Image (tube, grey):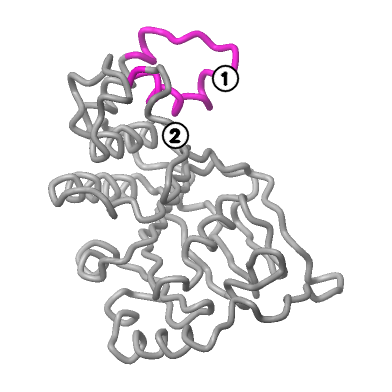
Amino acid sequence: MPHAPADPSASSAPAIGLHDLTLGYDRHPAVHHLNADIAPGSLLALVGPNGAGKSTLVKALAGELRPISGTVSGLAGRRIAWLPQHSALDPSFPIDVRRMVAMGLWHRVGALGRFTTEHRRLCDEALAAVGLTGFETRGLDTLSGVQLQRALFARLILQDAPVVLLDEPFAAVDHRTSTDLLALLHHWQRQGKTVIVVLHDLAQVRAHFPLTLLLARERVAFGPTAEVLTDAHWARAQRLHEPFDDDAPTCEAPQGPHTHAHHHGHGAEALA
């Protein structure tokens, strides 16, 4: 895969801080009073029962969802690459694979920039890194779901963001593709990037992710994966999740100088 030096700013980058964070929709809370500090350069898995708030948290980190209360710190002014669970990309859109991947160079090229020979080379290197050499001029409508996911990861490579957010990126791919893309996540971590991934495969989490946050609409456990993924913690997550009522009364944000809804100024580079 393309070689890149470790990010020299990684050691001085701020931790991503979640401070009494409550998230929800139409003021119905999906995540309650969450506190955590995620060190720069972390490779973190977000796990929990279905409906535990994992995707909601990722949306908030991406700047797509304003908190009901509490704050997120450490992301202002930082570029973020975000791959949602369900991409809004229309495979019938008349564009070839290379041009779709080239969208990851937006931070370099800009709206009026010219696509150069160097940019073409970077696109082809990224496609080679995800096993798609020879697919450069194929239309998106010719790709399988697995091939499209690999192409989206090639675009992530070109975004070269210091923070990467992925929501169930391996849910519909084969074992070989999962293995290849997991190797890419480890490569990003070695570069100093912070990589946060929503996952449901706990064996995969144990094998590849040194840090885990277990959610059940609130923090159940956070820390080294072996210490978080215990039978006791998982049983507690199930117990905590069951009583929640999606039709419960709305949650009011507390008022005061130190408690306010937070909106990121960074703007996530969502892959859709």
In the foreground, 92 or 96: 92
State which tag comes first along the sequence, 1 or 2: 2
User: Residue 146 vs residue 120: left or right?
Assistant: left
Q: Which residue is mark 1?
A: 110
- What residue appears at the point 58 percent right and 65 percent down from the top-left corner? 17
In this figure, which residue is indicated by the disc labeled 2?
A: 89
* Location of residue 198 with respect to 31 vertically, above or below: above
As drawn, 76 above or below 242:
above
Q: Residue at x 39, y 37 (%)?
A: 156
**Residue, far right:** 256
Q: What amino acid is found at the position of numbered circle 2 in the picture?
A: Leu
Question: At which x and y percent is residue 213?
Answer: 42, 72
Q: Residue at x 46, y 25 (%)?
A: 103
Count of marks placed on residues: 2
Residue 134, horizontal then vertical, whole percent: 18, 19
**From which residue to which does the magenta span run?**
96-120
SS at mark 2? loop
Of tags 1 and 2, the one toward the viewer is: 2
Left or right: 263 in relation to 124? right
Q: Secondary structure at mark 1?
A: loop
Task: Tell me, yes or no, whether the highlighted magenta stretch contains residue 247.
Answer: no
Disc 1 residue type (three-letter): Gly
Quarter of the picture containing the N terminus is top left
- Give the quarter of the image for residue 74: bottom right
Give x and y (percent) for residue 2: 26, 30
